[in-house]
Amino acid sequence: MSLNVERIVTGPFQENSYVIWQDGSPSCLVIDPGDDPELIIETILGKGLHPIAVVNTHAHLDHIGGVSDLKEKYGIPFYLHPNEKSVLDGYERDCAFFGMTPKVTPTVDHWLNTGELKVGDFLIQCVETPGHTPGGTCLVINDHVFTGDTIFAGSVGRTDLPGGDWNTLCESLVKAMKEIPGDYILHPGHGLHTTLKNEMLKNPFLIPLLKRVNS
């Protein structure tokens, strides 16, 4: 079935939240719901969808602000990689650092790991890509990849925040280039969608790593 992807830009960091659903089914997943849950709910209602879960690529403050509101409204579970617990636990601290008022820190219902995750009719391939955060995960669904802040069009995630590590991120980028087909559509946590094929040609952070991909 074809996957439909709706991008909702949220909060002061202009973070990409995603609502995704398959043709012929009202069931949807919400990926990385940011600081404006009302915008996400408006999209869900406008398209006549029924959320069944929230799945996150990582737990930075700009990616989780809407999780608790969505959990409360729809009674749905929240999935996150276990190595993100330290990031999630620092949500209120990080909001204070950026001068933001925190929402309710969400409770994780299911910890995800590498490999396949089945949520309703959605089959998600979880590719662990730490570096931006300790448990950063790319979510591959059909021919779409939700990369969080691991890779963007023309750039990659920063590693100067707590839990970030540049060498680890480089290893993850090499892994992604080896494991994810180049023509799959990448949906990043900020900015516009792209493909790995395009990024391997133009992204200045990926080009130096190509020799490791081909070795």
Image (tube, helix red, strand yellow):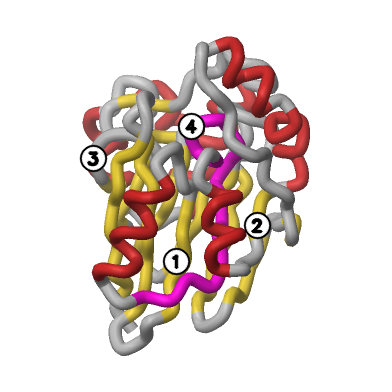
Q: Which residue is tagged 3? A: 192
N-term-proximal mark, 2 vs 3? 2
Cα separation between marks 2 and 3 = 24 Å
Cα separation between marks 1 and 2 = 15 Å
| Badge 4 amino acid | Asp
Q: Which residues are magenta?
A: 49-64
Image spot of residue 35 (x, y percent):
44, 37
Task: Find numbered disc 4 in the image and state the secondary structure of the residue it sits on.
Answer: helix
Task: Find numbered disc 3 in the image and state the secondary structure of the residue it sits on.
Answer: loop
N-term-proximal mark, 3 vs 1? 1
Q: Nearer the viewer, residue 71 or 151?
A: 71
Cα separation between marks 4 and 1 = 22 Å
Q: Residue at x 45, y 41 (%)?
A: 34
N-term-proximal mark, 1 vs 2? 2
Q: Which residue is tagged 4? A: 62
Is 59 in the magenta? yes
Task: Find numbered disc 2 in the image and state the secondary structure of the residue it sits on.
Answer: strand
Q: Which residue is tagged 2? A: 79
Image spot of residue 57 (x, y percent):
55, 46
Image spot of residue 115 (x, y percent):
66, 63
Q: Nearer the viewer, mark 4 or mark 1?
A: 4
Q: Which residue is tagged 1? A: 141
